[in-house]
Amino acid sequence: MKEYPDLRMHTAEHILNQTMVRLFGCGRSFSSHIEKKKSKCDYRFDRNLTGEETAEIEKRVNEVIKADLAVREELVTKEEAAGKLDLGRLPEGTGDSLRVIRIGDYDACPCIGEHVASTGEIGGFRIASSSFEDGVLRIRFKLA
């Protein structure tokens, strides 16, 4: 299991990813760096976010956090996951069984990291900044 410096921050990454998928259809981040004080996610995108979009992302992520959704894991086969989950970041040589993290009915994603037990443990989410360069939108975020 992969260890993260802050389980809250890693779980918030999952929620941010699903929020980006739902709002923009851009897919989950292709790269992320999770730290205790500030983290970042990179998305394939065509521009920077507007102020209104930033506020909407924060609002939606914080609604999921406040809903205090259960975070649970389950094992599924690759065959079961294919077509239902984004398998793009799976390393080569991954076995037939996948560990999937489910955040209520909001998100499901293969993951080897540790997470909080419920979203209510995360605290407030805030986008610190975003930038766009060469087809990559970078979102930097913090937790209260």
Image (tube, rainbow, N blue to C red):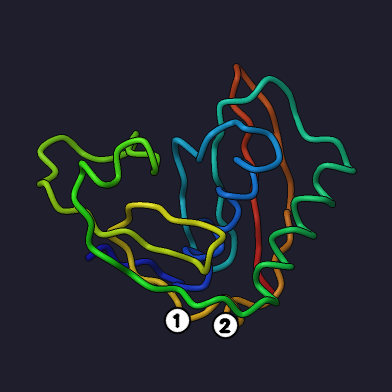
Q: Which residue is mark 2?
A: 121
- Residue 31 percent location from the top left of the image: 44, 39
Q: In the picture shown, does residue 111 fall above or below 11?
A: above
Mark 2 is surrounded, within 10 Å at the Cα level, by few (under 14), some (14 to 19) or many (20 or more) other residues, namely some
Q: Nearer the viewer, residue 83 or 90?
A: 83
Q: Nearer the viewer, residue 106 or 54?
A: 106
Taking the spot 52% from the left edge, 69% from the top edge, the residue there is 104
> Of the residues shown, which amino acid type is indicated by label 2?
Glu
Tell me the residue at 45%/81% (across/down).
Answer: 117
Quadrant in which the C terminus is drawn = bottom right
Asked if 54 appears above or below 143 in the picture, the reply is above
Provide residue 92's location: percent of width, then percent of height.
15, 35
**Image point (39%, 39%), residue name:** 86
Q: Is residue 82 above or below residue 37?
A: above
User: Is 132 left, or right, of 85 in this rendering?
Assistant: right
Q: Quadrant of residue 51?
A: top right
